[in-house]
Each structure stands twice: as structure tokens, then as C-alpha cells.
Image (cartoon, rainbow, N blue to C red):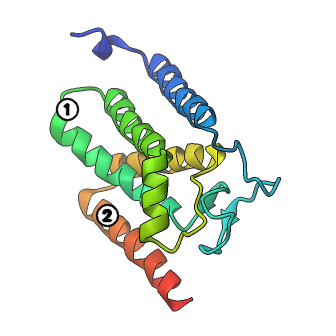
Amino acid sequence: MTIFQRLTPRACLLIGLAIIAATAATLLAFGQPAICTCGFVRVWQADVMSAENSQQLSDWYSPSHFIHGLLFYWLMWLLFRRQPLQLRAIGALILECAWEILENTPMVINRYREATIALGYSGDSVINSVFDVLFMLLGFVFAWRLPVWASVALGLFLGIVPLTLLVVR
């Protein structure tokens, strides 16, 4: 048994919180705003063309992070099925936090500006990134608790419905 297998659930929770805090600190060091530069926090930002997109707690991209959680659960299960669930969750958390950091580098921000409708995109607010990570963790928990067919159905639903609603708008 390795030291990682002996970690208590509480220790894993503290490690997870430290990873999220380090991610937030990194994004702040990059110069990302803590909250929307508009000065207030909303639970949901419905307008994908708004300057507040990727600045509020959740937006049209939030379901994609939930899907990351579904996918990361299965990836961690395939690669590390003998490891305790909480260690696999930490692995998924590290992947998602690494993505949030990479996503807010000048290289990726400029790529989004060139290739998408996000012409004025300047990266995510820190609070949006933290909630993206929490959406991923929620997806991870759902994948752990749901049968495989339900995880697949939920992933397809969350991938198709938001896209369909955005196209119809």
C-alpha cells in the first residue's frame, strides 16, 4: 500500500481544495480578474455574445465542464481502477485545473479570439474557472453514481441541448 492509498478522505479533500486554491492563485497571477469586471456576480450568463460570458459563475460552457467530469471519471477508472476513488478524483481535478490554467494563457486566449465568436474574449474570471472545476467534479460524482448508460445519455444530452439552444437563438 502506497502513501497515496493511505490518505484519508479528509486529507484528499484538503489536497483538492489546495489544488483549486493554487489554480485560482495562478490565474490571479496571470492577471485574470477575480470576478466579472462589470463589478457583480451572476449565477448564470445566458448571452454567449456578452462580455460577461466566461466571467460569471456559470454560462453555456458549464455543461462542457460537467461532461469533462463524466469523461475524466471513466479515464481515471480505466487507468487507475485499483486506486481509491478519492485519488482518481484528485487526478481528474489536476487535469481540469491544468486545463483552466492553459485555457487562460495568452496563446489559447488569442486562439479563441481568432477561431470563435468570442472576438473580445480576454479569458475567464477566476470565479468562473473555479466554478468550471466544480462542474467537472459534479460530473465526476454523477459518473461514479450513475450506470454507464445513464452517464453516456447525460453526456450526450448536455453536449447536444446547449448547442441546439444556441443555434436556435
Task: Estimate the x, y position of residue 98 in percent, counting from the top left.
Answer: 41, 38
Question: Which residue ends up furthest to the bottom in the rendered image?
Answer: 168
Which quadrant of the view contains residue 64?
bottom left
Secondary structure state at the residue bearing disc 2: helix
Q: Is residue 22 depicted above or below 75 in this figure?
A: above
Give, as a three-letter code, the residue at label 1.
Phe
Which quadrant of the view contains residue 90?
top left
Placement of the C terminus among the 4 image quadrants: bottom right
Q: Residue at x 66, y 56 (%)?
A: 55
Q: Is 87 situated left or right of 18 in this image? A: left
Q: Is residue 9 visible?
A: yes
Task: Estimate the x, y position of residue 136 in percent, counting from the top left.
Answer: 45, 48
Q: Is 142 situated left or right of 120 in this image? A: left
Q: Residue at x 69, y 44 (%)?
A: 33
Give, as a three-letter code, the residue at label 2.
Ala
Q: Is 117 situated left or right of 40 in this image? A: left
Mark 2 sits on what residue?
A: 150
